[in-house]
Amino acid sequence: GAGVSQSPRYKVAKRGQDVALRCDPISGHVSLFWYQQALGQGPEFLTYFQNEAQLDKSGLPSDRFFAERPEGSVSTLKIQRTQQEDSAVYLCASSQAGDSTDTQYFGPGTRLTVL
Amino acid sequence: DAKTTQPPSMDCAEGRAANLPCNHSTISGNEYVYWYRQIHSQGPQYIIHGLKNNETNEMASLIITEDRKSSTLILPHATLRDTAVYYCIVRVEEGYSGAGSYQLTFGKGTKLSVIP
């Protein structure tokens, strides 16, 4: 079946621009996660949704980062006034239930480059 | 979640077993050991997990020491497609609902290079 998809796969933004990154989780998956991966590092947690509820946003690095999942399916990660340090791969993952040990399935990521 | 320590890189000859170690000396009794891998330009992929017994699936085997302070991921017959970064992660057990219990905490992992 279809896995997690993300769009766009690549995004180049000028410093100061706003960007929106989309994640389509596996159909029916309750939980959705966003991670940020800097070059040469492991992914780092940003935020977590259970259905439409954002239960944890402790990893968002600043108030320029905002995520939503209004209907409990597709999610959008928005970054306002992008800075060079925002350049990274943004990964989305979904899991079937809200169980803490449920397997997370990752999308291919969106590579954001801020010039 | 407990911290893990892995070697930064390893080489393995194609067709041989790849044994990837992980140290998690501060693991708690309610924490599982998970392994994910990330092939270049892809998202991480789940491999296997276990609590205290050894586990095997179609991808790999997981050997956890009796004191649970370390584990080894074994790819029995490595192929070129197994070249990836392998992450060892510890997570709390099912049913735990404390803050921070849902996300995966990745380290830098081990870059495995399978050589022809």
Image (cartoon, rainbow, N blue to C red):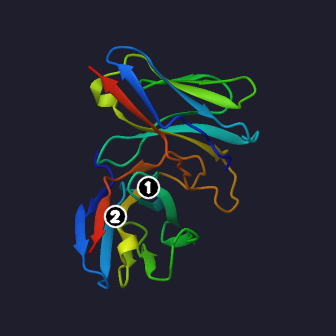
What is the chain identity of the residue bearing mark 1? A
The answer to whether marks 1 and 2 mark residues whose Cβ atoms lie closer than 8 Å is: yes
Q: Which residue occupies 60% across, 51% down? A: A100
Asked whether B102 or B108 is in front, the reply is B108
Position of B26 relative to A33 (above/below): above
Position of B86 relative to A22 (above/below): above
> Label 1 sits on what residue type?
Ser
Asked whether A72 or A114 is in front, the reply is A114
The kind of secondary structure element at disc 1 is strand
> Which quarter of the figure is the C terminus of chain B placed in?
top left
Residue A8 shows up from this direction:
no
What is the quadrant of residue A94 in the picture?
bottom left
Question: Mark 2 or mark 1, which is nearer the start of the sequence?
Answer: 2
According to the image, label 1 marks what residue?
Answer: A94
Q: Which residue occupies 39% across, 25% down? A: B11
According to the image, label 2 marks what residue?
Answer: A23
Residue A102, given in percent of the width and then of the height, sits at: 54, 47
Residue A108, given in percent of the width and then of the height, sits at: 31, 52
Position of B58 relative to A114 (above/below): above
What is the chain identity of the residue bearing mark 2? A
Badge 2 local density, few (<14 within 10 Å), some, or many (20+)? many
Residue B34, given in percent of the width and then of the height, sits at: 56, 38
> Label 2 sits on what residue type?
Cys
Q: CA distance from mark 1 to mark 2?
A: 9 Å
